[in-house]
Image (cartoon, rainbow, N blue to C red):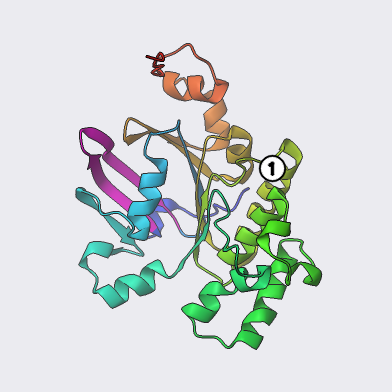
């Protein structure tokens, strides 16, 4: 992707996660997670199901509160901001959800323009123009704007979700398993769109995925989450050379290695 063109030490992280802990009942999901994402960088968090990837995003978005630790954006601790300032800071983030999360009762353009109308208070005529423009950026024509999500293929829904994620020209975009449920060709199309849209916006991107093809395509750096903490961070080139046994097993998709998957027999 090659968007990461600066020296980290000279930059304030766009997003900084410091010693995050989160427990649900007896299950410890985050266990001292630390990560820095720099302005204009695309970071991909990889890891198996249930390792805390989605919980991490939800903590940043304020949908969950960490039990301890803190989150910074642009050098400001989110937990120390006023409710208004925190909402404005979180409002910088666009989100492409795993399932698309489109509103079935709204047309495509209304889905794309939802935040423009509800949060930015932009008039509908202007919001529709912006929505059509964003749809064009993800390769969808004006004719798609008036149809409903039920009429779309899985790949088209992902494109609409991406158009909605960039509708407000966010400075940060989150991608939650962006290629889940897509065939290999459409997955590559979506990966290409992610690369181009992030680059055109100059945005910072944080993606969670277990799709290594997607990770390799869109990442400046890859971070592996295991047992609630980041155990390895590096570039794609470093990924191919690492001797970390957990990373090597995950990338290879092998049942053999230090990562053990619990298999419960039917009772």
* Vertical relation: 244 (above or below) 76: above
Which part of the image, by quadrant, shows the C terminus?
Answer: top left
* Vertical relation: 243 (above or below) 98: above
* Vertical relation: 241 (above or below) 77: above
Q: Is residue 243 left or right of residue 229?
A: right
* Vertical relation: 245 (above or below) 6: above
Please state the horizontal and vertical placement of residue 193, each as a whole percent of the image. 69, 54
Name which residue lies at 41% across and 16% down.
263
Please state the horizontal and vertical placement of residue 248, each as a whole percent of the image. 50, 21
In the displayed image of the protein, which residue is found farthest to the front? 267
Q: Is residue 177 left or right of residue 132?
A: left
The stretch of residues the image draws in magenta is 15-38
Residue with the mark numbered 1: 187
Q: Note whether residue 13 is visible.
A: no
Q: Main secondary structure of the magenta part?
A: strand
Name which residue lies at 57% across and 35% down.
236
Q: Residues within 10 Å of mark 1 (few under 14, many from 20)?
A: many
Q: Nearer the viewer, residue 67 or 171?
A: 67
Find out whether residue 196 is within the magenta segment.
Answer: no
Q: Secondary structure at mark 1?
A: helix
Q: Is residue 119 left or right of residue 191?
A: left
Please state the horizontal and vertical placement of residue 13, each as a whole percent of the image. 38, 57
Find out whether residue 16 is within the magenta segment.
Answer: yes
Q: Nearer the viewer, residue 237 or 64?
A: 64
Q: Note whether residue 22 is visible.
A: yes
State the count of labels.
1
Name which residue lies at 31% across and 63% down.
75
Please state the horizontal and vertical placement of residue 158, each as a whole percent of the image. 65, 53
Quarter of the figure with residue 116 = bottom right
Q: Is residue 214 left or right of residue 255?
A: right
In the displayed image of the protein, which residue is found farthest to the top? 256
């Amino acid at each position: 992707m090659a968007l990461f063109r600066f020296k980290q030490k000279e930059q304030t992280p766009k997003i900084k996660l410091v010693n995050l802990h989160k427990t649900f009942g007896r299950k410890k999901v985050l266990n001292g997670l630390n990560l820095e994402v720099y302005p204009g960088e695309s970071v991909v968090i990889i890891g198996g199901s249930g390792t805390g990837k989605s919980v991490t995003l939800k903590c940043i978005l304020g949908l969950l509160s960490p039990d301890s630790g803190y989150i910074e954006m642009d050098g400001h601790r989110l937990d120390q901001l006023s409710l208004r300032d925190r909402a404005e800071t979180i409002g910088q983030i666009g989100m492409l959800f795993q399932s698309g999360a489109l509103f079935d009762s709204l047309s495509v353009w209304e889905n794309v323009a939802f935040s423009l109308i509800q949060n930015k208070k932009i008039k509908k005529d202007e919001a529709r123009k912006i929505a059509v423009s964003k749809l064009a950026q993800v390769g969808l024509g004006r004719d798609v704007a008036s149809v409903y999500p039920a009429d779309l293929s899985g790949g088209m829904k992902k494109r609409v979700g991406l158009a909605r994620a960039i509708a407000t020209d966010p400075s940060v975009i989150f991608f939650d398993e962006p290629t889940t449920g897509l065939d290999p060709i459409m997955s590559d199309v979506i990966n290409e769109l992610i690369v181009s849209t992030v680059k055109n916006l100059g945005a910072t991107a944080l993606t969670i995925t277990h799709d290594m093809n997607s990770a390799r395509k869109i990442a400046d750096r890859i971070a592996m989450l295991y047992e609630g903490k980041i155990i390895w961070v590096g570039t794609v080139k470093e990924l191919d050379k690492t001797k970390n046994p957990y990373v090597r097993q995950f990338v290879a998709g092998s049942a053999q290695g230090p990562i053990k998957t619990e298999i419960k027999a039917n009772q």
